[in-house]
Image (cartoon, rainbow, N blue to C red):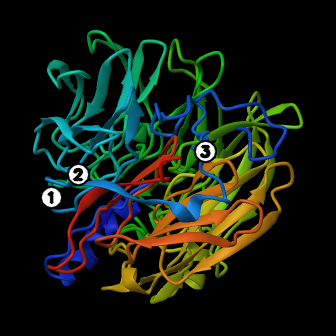
Amino acid sequence: MARGRKQAALGSRRRSLLAATIVIAAVCAAFVGGRAAFGSSAPPSPVKVGEWPLPGADRENTRYAPGPITSGNVGTLTEAWSVPIKGAGAFGTYATTPIVVGGVVYTQDIDSNVYAINLKTGQLLWYKQYDDADAGPNGVTVSGGVVYGATAHQAFALQAATGEELWTKTITNKSSGIDMAPGYSDGTVYLSTVPGNVKHFSSGEGQALLWALNARTGATLWKWNEAPTETWSKGNVGINAGGGQWYPPSFDAAGDIYVGTANPTPVPGTNSYPFGSSRPGPNLYTDSIVKLDHKTGKVDWYYQLTPHDIDDWDLQDSPVLTTVNGRRVVIGAGKAGIVVELDQQTGKLLWRKPVGMHNGHDQDGLLTLAQAKKKLTFPFTVYPGILGGVESQLASDGTNVYAAVNNLGATYTNNYESGIQTGNVFKGTGVLVALNQATGKIVWGHRFAQSPYGAATVTNDVVFTTTFDGMLWALSTKTGQVLWQKQLSAGTNATVAVAGDTIITAASLPLSQTQTAEIVAYRLPSP
């Protein structure tokens, strides 16, 4: 997940968590990340039963997959198989949603190594070793018999049947990295860099660029500068950075692209430039949902949730594309702990709903420097903090949108540290909320004693998530009632994929020497 730095880090849960993991010795951490509901009148899912073909299940990133698992039988799920996770870098073991196509599970560990696993038996079919650690989340996608993914530095394509490498392309410089699963649409692969990596963080030399690559050859089609610092840094280009993506873009029927972007830095500032004064203005296009033309990469519209962010509030989750009363909409969320719905055609805000704990800092970025110095006297605590808010992906069943929210604050003691308190990751609680897509009103909320970093995943009338203590949960989409829960073999920040009668997740976060990291599948009993 986040990595702390004396200079305010790139501003993501992935990057700040290092401070906590150092303290707990050998603990390694990497945080990750409208369809027809059961009984709903929404259109049927385009995802085939038995598959999870894209990182967000479909092009719209709804994280909804059809299949036989319902509230009536989810309690009968039992372990079908497990596969040890081989990679274990400085930031954990695993931070992705697996892909399932043609009876094969394709996935990636935090060291960028790729696995192909037989869905039915759990047999490892092939393994492509890269040993190039990133901070996560990462992952692969599959189309036309090809696996697309990235290491911390290169985009790649592999033969799905064998793991043979078809092409690679370096898209980073020494001060940037990659930590996302690629998007794929109509013969084009989309990958974003972030202005930092596990060795070098958050300087003006790091770049956040969205690359559109020819899927067959890896050739560059276009690039979009997500945070053009030359327009808002003035003489401080070497100090400031920002933007980047954690999760894949979404795509509408025309192929146009919707992305959620990360925060600007330094956060909250530096001694010489307190409260982001080295980067005056709104700092576009950070903390934004942006629609891009798929042919050119040019901005169609944007919505910025947090102008001039000084609280590390990435708007990083994949935007969900769905329909409300016949109107095409975009739903997004991120570390600010605010869910928004926009008109897909214009980007107009339709509703805005804070979720989880907030303590009066939602408008910090709009303060003048004088106001910030007066109001934000050190030490001060912000909810949600840099490991809080909606850290991982939303899900939609066409009626409700589901958000896993982390109630974890951050205390800032000065202008140059990122605000993580030693060990506070263990103090986080959380809530899974269901919001009505038409109104933004909360339908229900289920509280957890630990942070739910495991996103939301929906099939029929069941929504899955995981919590930091290694618990896998199944809740009713109608009431939030617990239908089933399972303790994994380690702590986790892993998400859940649904493939027919099988769900797949991971015990990704060993919290002691006795815990083991593994990819694990649970399955309904045979009829």
The residue at which mark 2 appears reads as: 110
Rendered position, 3 above or below 143: below
Most foreground residue, 470 or 91? 470
Q: Residues within 10 Å of mark 1 (few under 14, many from 20)?
A: many
Which amino acid, by three-letter code, is at mark 1? Gly
The span from disc 2 to disc 3 (Cα, nearest Å) is 31 Å
Q: Position of residue 307 (x, y in %)?
A: 60, 54
Could you tell me how far apart the alpha carbons at marks 3 and 1 are, in whole angstroms?
37 Å
Sequence order check: which comes first, mark 3 or mark 1?
A: 3
Note whether 14 is above or below 197 in the view shown. below
Q: Quadrant of the N terminus?
A: bottom left
What numbered label is drawn on residue 89? 1
Give the residue type that dot 3 points to. Pro
| Figure quadrant of residue 119 | top left
Contact between labelled residues 1 and 2, with CB atoms less than 8 Å apart? yes
Residue 438 image position (x, y, % from top left):
85, 48
Task: Residue at 10% x, 45% y: name it.
Answer: 131
